[in-house]
Image: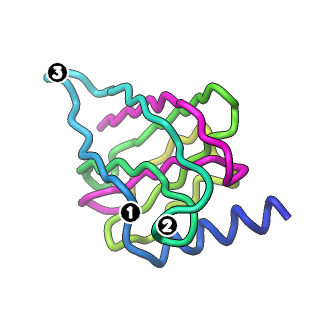
Amino acid sequence: MRKFATAFLALLLATAPAWGKTTVVRFPKGRTTVILKGRTTGGPSESGGMDPITYRLRAKAGQTLTLHLTSAKKNAIFGVWAPGMNPVDVGQNATDWSGALPKTGNYEISVWPEDEATNTTFTLEVTIRD
């Protein structure tokens, strides 16, 4: 059932506009890595499901994006969407991923609780390299 719920959420996120708060990622001058801290929000939201935390960053085709997610309750996962809201295959229940980006434009990374009901604090390490 959990796999179905996660797959269903991924489908909803891929076909719907970003929910909740979207934060633009800014890298410190001269740095290729940024550490983001947040809190997942599980349970009901105004959109009828959970309310993921979404980060938006601008990247170029061919750059490598590396993501590493840790959470206090070990239940936060992420999804990545390329420009045009095309899902990037990061695997199921992703907490670590690295890959070359297919397009230039704005990428969105959403973090949510795997169990859909539990809030947890998280740290997301984001690295972009040429």
Q: Where is residue 67 drawn, in percent x and y?
A: 49, 37
Disc 3 marks which residue? 30
Amino acid on which the number 3 mark rests in the picture: Gly
Numbered disc 2: secondary structure: strand
Q: Quadrant of the C terminus?
A: top left
Q: Nearer the viewer, residue 121 or 84?
A: 121
Quadrant in the rendering for residue 103: bottom left
Mark 2 / mark 1, whichever is N-terminal: 1
Q: Which residue is mark 2?
A: 87
From the top left corner, tell me how far across and down residue 106 is, in percent. Answer: 26, 58
Q: Determine the CA span between mark 2 and mark 1.
A: 6 Å
Identify the disc placed on residue 82. 1
The kind of secondary structure element at disc 1 is: strand
Q: Which residues are magenta?
A: 103-130
Q: Say left or right for 32 vs 65.
A: left
Question: Which numbered disc flags the more N-terminal residue, 1 or 3?
Answer: 3
Residue 54 counted in the magenta span: no
Q: Nearer the viewer, residue 106 or 74?
A: 74
Q: Amino acid at mark 2?
A: Pro
Q: Which of the image's four quarters has the N terminus?
A: bottom right
Under mark 1, the amino acid is Ala
Task: Give the SS element for disc 3.
Answer: loop
Going from N to C along the chain, the mark reached first, 3 or 2, is 3
Residue 86 percent across, percent down from the top left: 44, 71
